[in-house]
Image: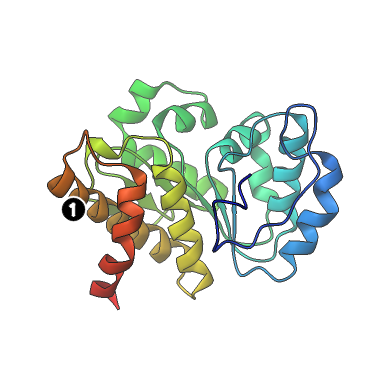
Amino acid sequence: MITSHLFQPVLKPLCENESKTLSIGAMNDVFEELNWADSVVIGCGLGNNDDTQVITGQVIKTSEVPVVLDADGINAVAPFIDILKEKKAPLVITPHPAEMARLVNSTVADIQQSRIACAKSFAQENDCVVLLKGANTVVTDGNQVFVNTTGNPGMAMGGSGDMLSGMIGSFIAQGMTPFNAAKSAAYIHGLCGDICAGELSQRGMTVEDMLSLLGALMSEFE
């Protein structure tokens, strides 16, 4: 079904479990693909159950290329967050405030009151890059801090975060450091949303509109 609509991505069928998510049986195929990857994005549409938790944990522990952890990837590691310290390669984690609250056993209100401090502390403790989503997205490696000024509420829709994670993974694969990739993606992603909102309105814009604009927008940064 997916392959009939997506013509550009190279897809690989994998074993699924009763929940229609990746099963443990897919593990060997997943790690075979890691052998040629320049970066890994995991979590978008993954689902959260025992199988996906094990697969996510193993990817973090064994990948030798940078990993971008998003969405259900974050949910998968939340119960055993110390696994982040077992990583071999650089890690970028992209939580929204509710996900961040679960990771640090806090509340959304507390996260929002001290967004920079919370993101910076988590990045230092886990030696990773944190991109804390929301108004004025915070990107930090525990030392450097970037606060994004682009973006608008119309971007709070399904698929927008997947687009951002894909951009981060793409920038890393093209040679950028994880921190630079995350802050660049946050800025360009938000700018893309702002332009779409200006042309179509915040209520009328879709992720497809943003994706259609992204290629032309990228020419301004080459």
Q: Work out whether residue 119 or residue 150 is closer to the camera in this orientation and state it.
A: 150
Q: Badge 1: few (under 14), some or many (20 or more) residues near its Cα, within 10 Å?
A: some
The residue shown at (25%, 49%) is 193
Q: Residue furthest left?
A: 198
Could you tell whether 189 is left or right of 87 in the image? left
- Amino acid type indicated by mark 1: Ile
The residue shown at (35%, 45%) is 207
- Determine if residue 217 is in view: yes
User: Measured from the top left, where is residue 174 in percent x and y?
Assistant: 49, 74
Badge 1 is on which residue? 195
Q: Work out whether residue 82 or residue 40 is closer to the camera in this orientation and state it.
A: 40
The residue shown at (51%, 61%) is 169
The residue shown at (43%, 59%) is 167
Q: Residue furthest bottom?
A: 222
User: Measured from the top left, where is residue 148 in percent x and y?
Assistant: 25, 51
Q: Quadrant of residue 87?
A: bottom right
User: Measured from the top left, where is residue 11 in percent x and y?
Assistant: 66, 57
* Colouring style: rainbow
Could you tell whether 5 is left or right of 79 in the image? left
Q: Work out whether residue 92 or residue 126 is closer to the camera in this orientation and state it.
A: 92
- Determine if residue 144 is in view: no
User: Measured from the top left, where is residue 74 in percent x and y?
Assistant: 57, 38
Look at the numbered disc 1 and give the secondary structure of its residue: helix
* The N terminus sits in image quarter: top right
Q: Quadrant of residue 219?
A: bottom left
Q: Quadrant of residue 213?
A: bottom left
* The C terminus sits in image quarter: bottom left
Query: Is 137 placed above or below 111 here?
Result: below
Q: How many marks?
A: 1
